[in-house]
Amino acid sequence: MNFGIVRYILGWVLEFEAVFLLLPVLVGILYGENDAAATFLAVAALCLLTGFAMKKKAPEQRDIYTREGFATVALSWIVMGVFGAIPFVLTGEIPSFVDALFETISGFTTTGASILTDVEALSHASLFWRSFTHWIGGMGVFVFIMAILPLMGGGTVMNLMRAESPGPSVGKLVPRVKDTAKILYELYLGITFIGTVALIATGLNLFEALTTIFGTVGTGGFGIYSDSVVSFSPLTQNVITLFMILSGINYTAYFCLLRRQFKEAFSIEEVRWYLLIILGSAAVIAWNIRKMYPTAGESIRHAFFQVGSIITTTGFSSADFDAWPQLSKTILVLLMFVGACAGSTGGGIKVSRILILFKAIRKELAMMIHPRMVKKIKVDGHTLSHEVLRSTNVFITVYFAIFFLSLLAVSIDNFGFTTNFTAVAATLNNIGPGLDMVGPTRNFALFSPISKCVLIFDMLAGRLELFPMLILLMPSCWKKY
């Protein structure tokens, strides 16, 4: 392990977090919350000084191999969560550090699971920071850093992007990694700006629009009201639905559209299946909940909203879907595992992996009938390599191993199976609300500190595609070169 480069990059991360923390300082000043503003400013100074000290001595060896890349990304997200939780503790709004860490990690990982019972009691500065963490974590802090400055030469920074970006494979849209990062953030900023304007047009004020779009485009789900977005108008909810679904699409499709490569954009299989799953699931749920609402239009609106919210792992709720019929709740739980597209801000297993698995199953069945047949698995017209198939199978195996171990761990608290199962599903898939005691009208405050730590690990593992967090647990990772 090249500890020098890990320390150096962690220093940069803390300095960037210091800059991010200045925004809630500004919000606190604007709303006359001087104590909150001073607290966030003090933590920003702490991040800045700590980061400066860590990167004061530049490392001699700047190459980042897979081990350094994965370990650095995992440690960076943990460090960001720890420092990001301090303001909540110092202001007294979340006195327990474990609870504050849970809330902050939930924000950065775009999970949206909360321990708060009275969201409105937070200051505007804290509400802004809580939602802004979604936006930071949505595209990824390393993508942001690489878009602004080159940390080191060569192509080894790709190991940082690969460790942080969601999906079974990460590639460059253009030859240079820095240019790829810039394009991704330009798209991200563009969708955020358009979404903010659209929400303001529906009647939200600037603060409501910004905090809501942070959770929408970042597919996070923290609301600034205890009822999530239930109190928003149907028009506002429809706009949120649209931008949630758009944010779950592979950003490669948007890049192709901007380059006027329309054929390539619309030929992406994953995007087609993603939209078909949404359409089919929403249609069934709308039919299933029809009698619960006065009009068909209202049932369709809630069905599309919740399907879009769950499959993109955003976690907003326009209704108490825990009160819906069993068929609708079962579909939503299944969508928790499917997730959004690779290369988006969404979590879950990802549609691309599900697609690859079904194609692999179909291949195996065909070979049982015709043993001598040579059949290759193709996605978007390209033959998948053995490495992609192997990594997909390993990911699924590790995913369910973590899921079941986490389920056993939180079961010690002796809550019901539905509560435990959906709590793990909601955190590992970065969704937010589950069912029963962690449903859309409840929260995660009921779990013990140990269970919360397990769920914090799940949130980080889910956002970072499992392996960066697991690498930290391997003794061989920490051996010095």
Image (tube, helix red, strand yellow):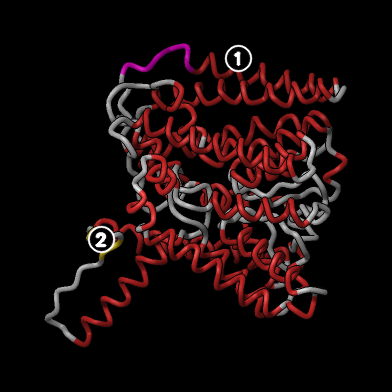
Front position in the image: 260 or 245:
260
Query: Residue 206 versus residue 103: which sits nearer the camera?
Result: 206
Which residue appears farthest toward the top when viewing the image?
A: 56
Q: Which of 194 and 309 lies nearest the eye of the viewer?
A: 194
Q: Secondary structure at mark 1?
A: helix
Kindly identify the residue that appears in the image at 86 percent across and 43 percent down: 120
* The stretch drawn in magenta includes residue 199: no
Q: Earlier in the sequence, mark 2 or mark 1?
A: 1
In the rendered image, residue 200, in percent from the top left (x then y), is placed at 74, 39
Q: Residue at x 37, y 62 (%)?
A: 269
Task: Evaluate whether residue 290 shows in this view.
Answer: yes
Quarter of the rendering occupied by the C terminus: top left
Q: What residue range appears in magenta? A: 55-60
Q: Give left or right: position of 360 versus 95.
A: left
x%, y% of residue 103? Answer: 70, 44
- Asked if one can make out residue 415 in the rendered structure from this viewpoint, the answer is no
Indicate which disc residue 263 carries: none
Q: Left or right of 358: which side holds 386?
A: left
Which label is found at residue 49? 1
Q: Amino acid at mark 1?
A: Leu
Q: Dividing the picture into quarters, in which one does residue 17 lie?
A: top right
- Residue 59 part of the magenta segment: yes
Quadrant of the rendered image containing residue 284: bottom right
Residue furthest left as drawn: 372
Q: Residue 312, how many percent across, how many down? A: 57, 56
Q: Find residue 381 and name its label.
A: 2
Quarter containing the N terminus:
top left
Dominant secondary structure, magenta: loop
Residue at (43% x, 30% y) in the render: 182
Amino acid type at mark 2: Gly
